[in-house]
Amino acid sequence: MNILVTGCKGQLGTELQKIAARGTQHQWTFTDVDTLDICDKAAVERCFEENQIEACINCAAYTAVDKAEDEPALAEKINAYAPQVLAETCLKHKALLIHVSTDYVFGGDANEPYKVDDAINPQSVYGKTKAEGERLIRESGSNHMIVRTAWLYSSVGKNFVKTMLMLGDTKDEINVVADQKGCPTWAYDLAVALVALLNKNGKNDVHETFHFTNEGQITWHDFATAIMEIGGKRCKVNPITTDQYPTKAKRPAYSVLDLSKIKDYGGIEIPYWRDSLIKCIEEINSGLLRSSQ
């Protein structure tokens, strides 16, 4: 198939590029905002026609959660309007849209993992715009798979793991919230899952929503402690409450996603969070080693 990937310079897009470079049966077109404005209908249409696109994996998003509170129009443009443009173009070209969404569409007040069809109740501009993007995709009538994920990290870009490793080199101790629970996701594992979903459904009529994270549920404090331990940092991680670390956008206290649907779908590997964290930190360290030689 001819596959379009948007947001290719981000964490997930970078991992998809690595998978494509190893060789697959697909032809890949990788774009980012500097080569394709996905808010520009005419530009998206030209891209689909010129590359005979049969499926699109949308990795592009406005993900600055706190900044979105001050830039709601821009967040809505990227997180809602752009997915609508892609969905409508996919419908016209009989192509499949795989769209990445977020745990932030839920209210964060549950006490058991959120199922795919649970009611949404976003509490932030970021969450509301991502929920609107989901709605517009579904209403477009295009073939689509919406995949919600959470706590994404990788060896590239800005993310919690890289920030903690940096702080571990410069601080003796740090404070990390211990009353917000969720599921970390290594971007590589998500990329592998998206390609598996694509291979299974590329030519099918499909209108589905899935959840994908790594296995296991932890707090941010648990996550930070593991990063320091695995990364060989001596920085002490102190637990604090959400009230002690106020942010502009409200964070979900509980955003664990139920993975039963994607497990039942078959053929999707879901590694345990700590195993994937070890692999990612090894990758980060090997990259630092290469750059210093």
Image (spheres, rainbow, N blue to C red):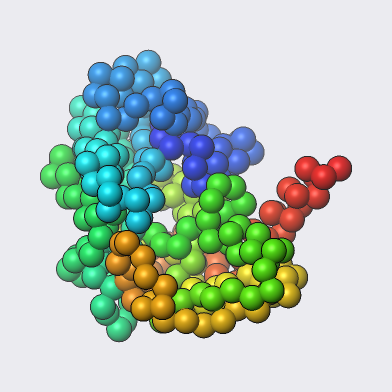
Q: Quadrant of the N terminus?
A: top left
Please state if 49 lies on the left or on the right of 80 as rendered: right
Please state if 170 lies on the left or on the right of 293 as rendered: left
Q: Where 141 falls versus 233 (above or below)? A: above
* Residue visible at 30% across and 83% down in the picture: 111
Residue 40 horizontal/vertical position (percent):
27, 24
Residue 77 horizontal/vertical position (percent):
24, 38
Q: Where 112 falls versus 287 (above or below)? A: below
**Foreground pick, 57 / 256:** 256
**Foreground pick, 112 / 127:** 127
Kindly tell me whether residue 196 is visible in this rendering. no
Residue 102 in which image quadrant = bottom left
* Residue visible at 55% across and 41% down in the picture: 14
**Foreground pick, 190 / 284:** 284
Residue 83 horizontal/vertical position (percent):
26, 39
Q: Where 279 falls versus 229 (above or below)? A: above
Q: Quadrant of the C terminus?
A: top right
Q: Where 21 falls versus 106 (above or below)? A: above
Q: Residue furthest left?
A: 139
Residue 238 in which image quadrant = bottom right
Please state if 274 lies on the left or on the right of 181 as rendered: right
